[in-house]
Image (tube, rainbow, N blue to C red):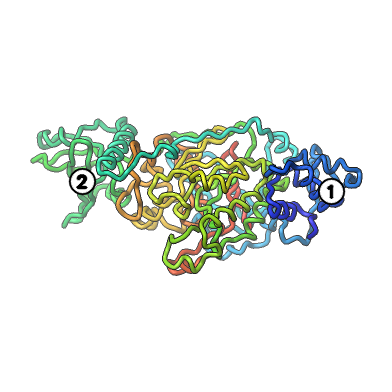
Amino acid sequence: MPLETPSRIVQELVRRGYNAEREAVTLLAGAANPSLALERAVERAPDDALRLTTEHVRAALDDGALATDADPPVSTGTPPVQSSESEDSSPVETKGSNEPSPMANAPSATGAPATTDTSTTTDTPATTDASTTTDTPATTDASTTRDTQTATDASPAAATRRSRDPGRRSVEIDGDVTGRSTGTGEYGQFVTTFRDRYERLSKLLRGRVNHRPAEAIAKMSGGSDAEMIGLVNDVRSTASGHWLVELEDTTGTFPCLVMKNKGIADLVDELLMDECVAVQGTLSDDAGILFVDSLHFPDVPRTYRPSTADRHVQAALVSDVHVGSQEFMLDAWQRFTSWLHTEEAEAVEYLLLAGDMVEGVGIYPNQDEELSIVDIYDQYEAFSEHLKEVPGDVEIVMIPGNHDAVRLAEPQPGFDEELRGIMSAHDARVTGNPSTVTVEGVSVLMYHGVSLDEVIAELPSEKASYDEPHRAMYQLLKKRHVAPQYGGHMRLAPEEKDYLVIEDVPDVFHTGHVHKLGWGKYHNVLAVNSGCWQAQTAFQKSVNIDPDSGYAPILDLDTLDMTVRKFS
C-alpha cells in the first residue's frame, strides 16, 4: 500500500501497534519513499516502544538513501504532500467549500438554519448582556472560516506553531469519585447524600432569601412573611388549577402554593423532583400554607465571566464513539484522526472524550444482533487501536458513559485497572463521570449525560428537547446539579457527598449520550453536546432517534469560540 498521505501512514502504524507524534508522521509523509522510511523508523524504535517519535524518524531519514529535497524541515511548516485522490484526506467541509453538507435539508440541532459549510466558525463571543441566554447557530458564510487563525499574525500556521509548547500545558481534575466511592446502598447513605446536596445548594441560595427552617415556619403566626429553601418533595395541581409545591429541608416539609395567575407560575413547569429551590411569600391566615410570590433556582450568576487560556490552543470535544457496534463510523473516525495530524489541526492539543468509548453488551433489548464485536474486552482492545490514530502529542482525557464497563449508578468511577491497561498506549487520563477538567485555566465540566433523558421527558419541549440538547443542559446549569431528579431512569449511588452538585460554575459544560449535536451559551457558560460516531441503529430507529454523527466540535481555549467540523 503506498504511504503518500499522513492518513495512510497512521493506519499502517496502527496496524503495527504504534502511535506516533504528529511531527513524526509529517516527516514520513514528506520522505521520498515513505514506506521505506517507515520501515527504517520502526527498526530504530526500541522493542518496547508504543510511540514512534520524531527522533526515530529523523534517525531513519539521516540515511543517505532516504534523504531528499522532499523532506521538509519541520521549522518551515511546509505542509505534508497529500494525494489529491486520497479518500482519507481532509473532508471538503474542513476546507471552506461552499458545497452543501449532507445535513443541509435537515433541522439544525441548534434550532437555526442547517450548516451549509461545516468548516465555518460558530463564534460565541462573550454575551454582552449577561441576563440573556445565547444560542449559537452555525455560520453559513464560508468567508468566516477561522482555520486555527490568530488575530496577531498574518500567517496562522506560524502563529500556532510558535504557540505549541508542551511545557505550557496543564490539566487538573476535580470532583472525581474514582477511588473514593464508599456507597453500599444502605438507606442511611442516601440520607447523607441528599443532606449534602441540600447543604451545598442551599448555600448558593441563602444570599437571596432570609431562610427559615420548615419547623420554624410551622410555628409562625398567620399572615407573616416567610422564606424557605428546600428540596422539591412533591408538585401537584389543585382543583382550581393552582400549583402545590411541597418543600423539604433537614427539619421537615412545608406546603407552598403557586397561584396560576402569578407571573412565576410558568417556572413550576421547570421543577424536577429533588432539586433545591428557594421561595418567598406570605403565610395563610391559619399559617398552614405559604403563598409564593417569588421562586429562585441556585442558577449561574448573570455576572459570570469565564476564564480563558493565555495562548491560542484548542481542544476537540467528542463523545459516544461506540466501538463494537455494527454502526460505528470507522471511516469518519479515521478522517477525524487523520485531520488531527495535519497542519490545519496544529493548535488541537487536547481531546476530551465524554463517555461511551464502546458499544457495550446488554445495554438495550436485542443489542447483540447489532454488535460487530461481542466481547466487551475485545471492544476496548479495538477502541485502543483506534485511539492510537490520534497524534501521540495530543493530551487525552476521558470519562465513562452508560455503555462502558463501569457501574451504571452515578457518579461513575473511572475505568478499572484492567481496562486502563488495555487503553494505556496513548497514556490517556481517565477520570470519573462527572468530573471538572481544567485545561490551561479553562474549567470544563464533563458529564456523559444520562440525566438529559429525564430532563427532556419531564420538561416542556420548548425548554428541553433532543433536537436542542443544549437547552436541557441549560436546565442542569440553572439547577446547579447534573442529575437532580432521582427515582426514574436515573440511577444514583449514595456517597458521603453528592458528586453531582455543580458547586463551582464551569466555563464549559460538555456532555454526550443523546447522540445529538447542540451548543449555545447560558449566562456565558458554553454548553456543548458533541453528537456521536455511530450511525442510526435499529433500536434508535425504533425510538425515533436520528443521530448527528461524525462531528467534532473544536474549542478555542483562548476565546471560547467554537468550530464544528464534519467528517462523515
The CA distance from mark 1 to mark 2 is 72 Å
Q: Residue at x 77, y 54 (%)?
A: 5
Q: Nearer the viewer, residue 175 or 501?
A: 175
Any mark on residue 327, and which? Answer: none
Q: Nearer the viewer, mark 1 or mark 2?
A: 1
From the viewer's perspective, is residue 174 above or below residue 104?
A: above
Within 10 Å of disc 1 (Cα), the crowding (few <14, some 14-19, many 20+) is many
| Image quadrant assignment for residue 489 | bottom left
Q: Left or right? Give the position of 181 relative to 124.
A: left
Task: Report if residue 456 is visible in the image.
Answer: yes
Percent across and percent down for residue 351 are 59, 44
| Image quadrant assignment for residue 3 | bottom right
Residue furthest toward the left?
286
Determine whether the residue tagged by mark 2 lies in a helix, strand or loop.
Answer: strand
Q: Nearer the viewer, residue 43 or 527?
A: 43
Q: Residue at x 14, y 34 (%)?
A: 224
Q: Are marks 1 and 2 in contact (CB under 8 Å)?
A: no
Percent across and percent down for residue 41 are 79, 45
Q: Which residue is mark 2?
A: 246
Q: Which residue is mark 1?
A: 31
Quadrant where the N terminus is found in the figure:
bottom right
Q: Nearer the viewer, residue 183 or 106?
A: 183
Q: Residue at x 20, y 34 (%)?
A: 213
Percent across and percent down for residue 479 are 36, 43
